[in-house]
Image (cartoon, coloured by chain):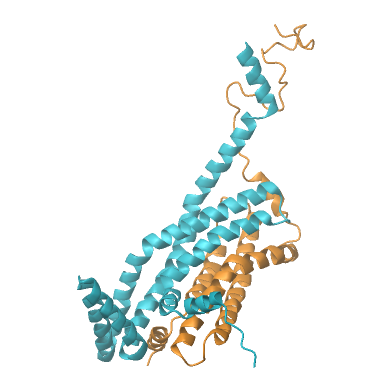
Chain colours: A cyan, B orange
Amino acid sequence: MKITPVKKALIIARNAVTNPKAAEFAKNTVCAMAVETTLKASFRPTFIYCDKHANKQSKKYAATKEFLYQTFCLGLYLSLINPVKDRVYKLISKKMAAKNPEDKRKLDLYDSFQSQIKQTKDKNLKKQLQNRFTHLLHTNKDYHFGKGVKELSSILSTVFILAICAPITSQLVLHPVMDLIFKKKQEDEQSNSPQNNYVKQIMNNK
Amino acid sequence: MTFIHKLCEKLGENNKPIYTVMAVACGKGTVRPILSITDKKEAPDARKYAALRELMTEFIGVPTTFACGLIGESLAGHIAKKGTQAYKNARAFMSFLGICTAAGYFVPKFCNLGMPPIMKKLMPDYDPNAAAVEKPSVSRKPAFGQITPNQNYYNVYRVKSTSPFYRAGMRV
């Protein structure tokens, strides 16, 4: 039997993919959306710019607009997500708790553990509590409901910010910015045209 | 058990990034075309074109992202043994990687390839390049001392056309 050595890089990649922290990062709505929007902001304008069907001027315009729009979305999302998410969570949990006492118990359980972690100042103790909380989230079904409400509020807030707020506010902000950029560019092009350079040269000689 | 209760239990047990991405894509696919079609600053044809283009982008984006997420998830079986915690972790991360690949490469690539023929079929008479070139240009008065292409730029000293020096090219 022939034994081939497993490459070190492959082992590192496998460890990185199966790492629980990486999985937590991927499952976190805010982190996932932030990474996705950053990728969109960098790659979408590049693809628009490389498009062979459009002419140069319209490509430049569309790529700049897309870059500004995605960057604006990212900024708006990161600045608004936490306050909006907290409000939505409070609203949903209040409604759920009012309907069913069993749901109220589960939500209280989840909230009390989270507030306990927040209030702890000792770093080691905080880490221990966080590990225990992560373990409970995977094993104890009572904690699933609280986490689910938290994730649902995250998803709803993300949809509200990125699909409703961002397009509306971007229309108000992006139109003037785009006008400013392309107006200025056009003015520069006109002032640097051969005719105007010639005039300037004559004026200076005079 | 209500629908929201079931949904919360499911999300608490296993939240995938694909759910949020799909929800946002569907929301954008509804809101952005509505906003484009109600934008009164644009011409009616340009509005219709922009709305259709945004709708088609999401039509391409939603299945592509979904498929990439699923492909990523299915690759987790090659990385870790099924049923283990490592497999679950790998599944979540690979799904995320699939979505990132879709957002960064496949969706813009497919849009670049598929959009021109689709838009030509939907709006055969409309030329987007003509409108896009016109858009950035702003009509304005020329600044002092600036000469527009229509003017005779050799006539810097404003010599009257009736003057004998006008066509002689003399500069005093």
Whole-percent x, y for residue A110 in the image = 27, 82
Left or right? Give the position of B14 relative to A4. Answer: left
Q: Which quarter of the figure is the N terminus of chain A placed in? A: bottom right
Left or right? Give the position of B59 relative to A15. Answer: right
| Residue at the far right in the pictured view | B168
Q: Which quarter of the figure is the C terminus of chain A placed in? A: top right
- Can residue B35 be seen here? no
**Total numbered circles:** 0
Q: As rendered, which of A60 and A21 lies closer to the eye?
A: A21
Name the residue rendered at 72%, 27% in the picture. B150
Where residue A42 sits, quadrant-wise, is bottom right
- Can residue B51 be seen here? yes
Residue A157 higher or lower than A42, as above or below: below
Whole-percent x, y for residue A61 in the image = 61, 49
Residue A163 higher or lower than A51, as above or below: below
Name the residue rendered at 51%, 46% in the picture. A177
Whole-percent x, y for residue A113 in the image = 24, 81
Residue A77 higher or lower than B143, as above or below: below
Name the residue rendered at 50%, 63% in the picture. A37
Where residue A192 sits, quadrant-wise, is top right
Q: As rendered, which of B48 and B62 lies closer to the eye?
A: B62
Whole-percent x, y for residue A16 in the image = 48, 76
Name the residue rendered at 56%, 56% in the picture. A66
Q: As rendered, which of B163 and B40 lies closer to the eye?
A: B163
Residue B9 higher or lower than A166, as above or below: below
